[in-house]
Amino acid sequence: MTVIRSAITGVGSFLPEQIVTNADLAKIVDTSDEWIQERTGIKQRHKARDDQPTSDLAVEAARKALLDAGRTADEVDMIIVATTTPDMTFPSVASIVQRKLGSGVGVAFDVQAVCSGFVYALGVADGFVARGMAKCALVIGAEEMTRLMDWTDRSTCVLFGDGAGAVVLEPREGQGATTDQGLLGFALRCDGTKTDLLYVDGGPASTGTVGHLRMAGNQVFRHAVVNIAEGVTAACAAAGVAVDDVDWFVPHQANQRIIKGVGDRLGLDENKVVSTVALHANTSAASIPLAFDAAIKDGRIKRGDLVLLEAMGGGLTWGACALRL
Ligand code: UT7
């Protein structure tokens, strides 16, 4: 049976230049490099300049992904940006990215599912590409989480960073088999009863301010391991593959202990798990495409590999996607 798959034909990422180390943060809050590394695995994070909005990071990542795909901006007919830190309340970051890239009129909008945003956005884009409604789609995860930090709250401000990653999706004919190139199966979830565990205490229709990120860290941690493991299992089932068949796991990069906890629960070989949390910290919707790009560029993930992306974040949202590169 012939089917149209959404294939990833290009990948790119971008990190703002400024690096903030754990030692830098220990100068402003009561923390230490030792505590942060031991509890999270994080060594450093990148931080955007004041005059460098989320759309600028997204554009840089998008340009690299287009180059990798051998496509030009004028061929792009759809842009989806997963972000929780837009330049403005509206227009969408995707609209601004379209203008900055110089792509013509097409579909452009943002997806807001916090740290799960990139997996959600891939799921949305897959619907367009596989139904012939987009021929060259950019799916971007771009975040400036440092804008949401309360720099007096040591329990959150040490965890997050800024960055962007992007993929180009194009239709490819497949056989409906697990050997097809493209996105093979998803699991996307939200449990809205747990909005109070991880949220920003501001917004245009509440306080009229941007607000700061608040998190009941250890409760989120417990849900993360269970939920992500469930999402991975469900996405593999939807794709018709076994967890053991997966060549590479590219998890959301929130905490090395969560990544390990999920790996232990699923019995994963830790050599198959990509981790960039030490260098990037938690970049929310950008973390998966940043890690994915890093592992492709350093030669670990190769064309034809079966890859599993997974995430969990505010909402609580979580999800996973099995794909063949
Ligand atoms: O991406 C969205 C999803 N987010 C996540 O997945 C994050 C999930 N949560 C976590 O990663 C972890 O829960 C944290 C890293 C946030 C916290 O680690 P924890 O092992 O759960 O620590 P805790 O919150 O239970 O706090 C332990 C202690 C507390 O002190 P007391 O009450 O035991 O005296 C905290 O006050 O560590 C203290 N603490 C710190 N100490 C030094 C909290 N933050 C810091 C800090 N430096 N930065």
Image (tube, helix red, strand yellow):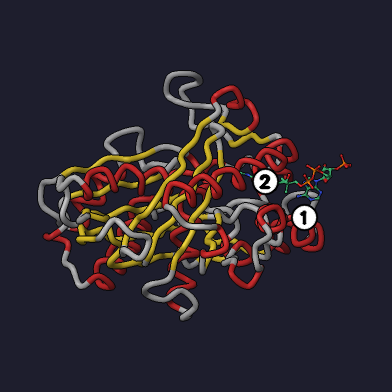
Query: Which residue extends farthest top?
Result: 206
User: Residue 196, percent across and down?
Assistant: 63, 25
For the point 72% across and 57% down, which residue is it? 264
Read off the residue under disc 2.
225
Vertical relation: 215 (above or below) 184: above
Q: Is residue 53 left or right of residue 155?
A: left
The front one of 52 and 120 is 120
Task: Assign the C terminus to one quadrant of the image.
Answer: bottom left
Q: Which residue is mark 1?
A: 39
The residue lying at 45 percent from left, 40 percent from top is 84
Q: Nearer the viewer, residue 42 or 316?
A: 316
Q: Quadrant of residue 289?
A: bottom left
- The kind of residue on which mark 2 rests is Val
Give the residue displayed 67% in from the left and 38% down from the top.
223
On the image, the x and y values in percent for residue 147 come to: 51, 45
Give above or below for 117 relative to 38.
above
Above or below 275: residue 4: above
Q: Secondary structure at mark 1?
A: helix
